[in-house]
Image (tube, grey):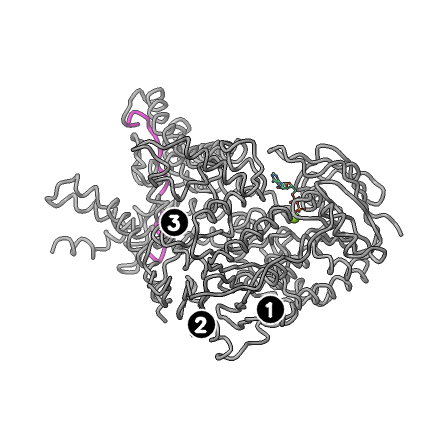
Amino acid sequence: MKILEIIFSTSFGYAILRVTTPILFAALGAVISDKAGVINIALEGIMLMAALWGVIISAFTHSAWWGLVAAIVSGVLMSFILAYFSLNLKTDVILAGIALNLFSSGGTIFILYLVAHDKGISSSLKSEVLPQMTLPLVNKIPVIGPIFSGHNILTYIALLAVILVYVLLYRTPLGLRIRAVGENPDAADSVGIGVNKIRYIALLLSGILASFGGAYLSMGYVSWFSTNMTAGRGFIALAAEAMGKGTPLGTFFASLLFGFAGALANNLQSLRIPSEFIQMIPYIVTIIGLVIYSSSQVSRIKKVKEQ
Amino acid sequence: MKEILKMQNITKVYPNGIVANKRVNFSVNEGEIHALVGENGAGKTTLMKILFGLEQPEEGAIYLNGKKVSINSPFIAIKNGIGMVHQHFMLVPSLTVAENIVLGIEPRKRGFIDFKKAVEITEELAQKYNLKVDAKAVVRDLPVGMKQKVEILKALLRGAKILILDEPTAVLTPQETEELFEELLRLKEKGHTIIFISHKLREVKQISDRVTIMRHGKNVGVFKTSEVTEQDISKLMVGRDVVLKIEKTQHKPGEVVLEVKNLTWINEWGKPTLKNVSFSVRSGEILGVAGVEGNGQRELVEIITGLRKFDKGDLLLDGKIINNLSIKERRELGISYIPEDRMVYGVAAEASIAENLIADRFEKREFNHGILTNIRKIASFSKYLIEEFKIQCSSFNQKVKMLSGGNIQKVVVAREFSSGPKLLIADQPTRGIDVGATELIHKKIIELRDRGTAVLLISADLNEIMELSDTLIVMFGGEIVAYFDDLSKVTEEELGTYMLGLKKQSYEEIRRVLYA
Ligand SMILES: Nc1ncnc2c1ncn2[C@@H]1O[C@H](COP(=O)(O)OP(=O)(O)O)[C@@H](O)[C@H]1O
Ligand SMILES: [Mg+2]
């Protein structure tokens, strides 16, 4: 079987991590904002904006690092707008998030046209990509080496971020406050914790993580920006967070599952299967994943009851 | 005696136009236990929320130790040595006791939370004030009395010199109340000032040094507690002589209407919240369910009304199994329901009074002309119920959310009672409403009973349940632990021992509630 041959190759393992990276960043962003009790549905738009600004600024400064900084700044700005509308002006956070996504989808094309005189792709800009890293020693190990070594630096940062988010949420005062605010805002308020302040911080952190994901897409995964290149990854990230039960580790594994599906779709394009069908795979996996997740919840409750 | 706190000329108008405090003056001396009493809705909580910075007054000033202060957030209140234990606890269920206690002032080690230190702090504090808590327990699993201790410790850790307790005994059994009182006296010895809100006058007499009485948002009197009687206080509270007894005749039970058989319910965390519960309710009888909240009452009510699906046990109405009937089918068979949370399950707050009154029968022929509603019929029906249940409103077209709590509850009661139910499930029917509305609802429940309805009454208010019920079961830990067929032979203290799980009747004694 050709498919099995593909799946059990080291290059496929490498591809999984590569495809997982942007989803993982955004999903960790979802973890933080969800814990604080605000759903950041604007992850998609934040990623998209970040992807564009990364490309533009890296092209002008000839530095991928300045591109990354610009991507993060755009993420902070976007989530600040979301926070201001939902927390200060009390707009429904879902509506504000949808508005930001629509804004990004159109706005990025507009800006792209202004800067690159093209409505589809940024190829006229000489943008930079972030470096790939060969892990010394690890790259010598058979099987492990080819899978784990040689990734874009952001892939390693994403893996590190899983641990950092865990430590933040469960080991620091800020994390305790984020969890308290999400679970019982009145309780937090009554001990003098500024609920809005904590939610601002959570949304900004969430935006920063998502913008890393966006920067990776246009300065690592590929080396250009193209319209709507996030292709729903911000929403897949929300699904991954839900499947991961909102914990950093669970979310990591759920993101890997989606990474697997994405990598599979990419690889099957070499086979004679209609590409439209193959491109559906990640989304179908999202739906199946959520169904399995929720039915396993139900059966777990049932099992417990039967004892 | 030094005056530690003075609130002067406090006026508070809520956005919905309710004037909760009218030019209230309130003064507390250092080191005293000061009771603040008044009926539900008198404005006690509002006044204390203003003191704690949760609400801003339209007018008035607050002085602490003679100095004027402006308290515009709980943070400032805490800094000024004010602590508050709210009526609804302000705890984070998934965190541990220690985490809840240090929340916002977490001990740190190199930027991280020092969990060990948090536990130490909690244990030291608990030791110092003799408030026994398990620092590592998760708050979700704690009984109410324990949560209250956590709340008190929380306030003390933040340096509260003035401690406000908003109806702390409402959720406690008599035994837990005694324990709380001992703790309060110990706090007083250590120099703390305590403001104690209650409308249970016996407790006020027992624990307080002075008492301030509120009625309709005004301060109507301040006394040394030893110089007034319970009768005096209650007269000022209500503005007239109160009938403390509910008038009712001996009940004449008929056939069994509802029979619950071996009902078991296990929650999401695998804990059984109902264990093999069996009982029956007869027509013309009010069966009370006593118990500390969270001992299975909610699950029981939701299963009987059909809000919750279940798979172990049987429900019989008039001898027929109704296990799998929908809520609507159950209502059609004659089950009525006054829910605990009236704003969520009782009314549609945005809809009018009339719309709420016909919510369970709008599709009946009498309220329609073909496919259109019969507005005239609905109007006359609503007017009749508004009259009958003394609902105070401007018209039947008024939105329900504009009404006061007592009147909203009357809308629910009017709808549920007017369908002529066989079985009424009344879950906390008078919680948080004024005495007038409470009296009316009690009277109507007894009227229903006398017309042969079977009534299942769930209430956390011991007084209400003792006065209103004909027979009584007590629930503890998801089980029925006692059955009484003659309430004149039980005292509140005795009930308390069952409610706390200190005592349990024999299987045979409890079985009597099946009347078989
Ligand atoms: N947040 C609020 N918005 C509008 N009205 C309120 C609010 N809180 C309380 N009220 C109203 O203010 C009055 C006083 O309430 P409260 O201070 O809670 O009384 P008490 O604590 O004495 O029972 C009541 O009529 C109540 O319905
Ligand atoms: Mg109150």
Decide if residue A67 is in sight here.
no
Instruction: Give residue B487's mark.
Output: 1
- Picture quadrant of residue B157: bottom right
- Name the residue at 74% across, 45% down: B239
Classify mark 3 as within 8 Å of ligand 1 or not, answering yes or no.
no
Q: Nearer the viewer, residue B302 or B247?
A: B247
Question: Which of label 3 and label 1 is nearer to you?
Answer: 1
Q: CA distance from mark 3 to mark 2?
A: 50 Å
To which chain does the residue with label 3 belong? A
Q: Residue at x 13, y 41 (%)?
A: A274
Queried whether the magenta region covers residue B142, the answer comes back as no
- Left or right, residue A189 beside residue B1: left
x 54%, y 49%: residue: A184
Front one among A165 and B261: B261
Q: Is residue B397 left or right of residue B110?
A: left
**Residue under label 2:** B514
Residue B388 position in % (x across, y down): 53, 42
Q: Which mark is residue A241?
A: 3
Crowding near the residue tagged with mark 1, few <14, some 14–19, many ≥20 C-alpha atoms within 10 Å: some
Query: Label 2 lies in what chain?
Result: B
Viewer-side residue, A226 vs A126? A226
Which region shows up in magenta? A121-138
Amino acid bearing label 1: Leu
Between marks 3 and 2 in the image, the one whose residue lies nearer the viewer: 2
Q: Is A137 covered by the magenta stretch?
A: yes
Circles 3, 2 touching at the beta carbon (< 8 Å): no
**Residue B106 position within the rendered picture, expressed as x and y whole percent measured from the top left:** 63, 54
- Disc 3 residue type? Glu
Between marks 3 and 1, how big is the CA–CA gap? Answer: 55 Å
**Residue in front for this viewpoint, B503 or B448:** B448
Label 1 – label 2 distance at C-alpha: 18 Å
- Give amino acid for label 2: Leu
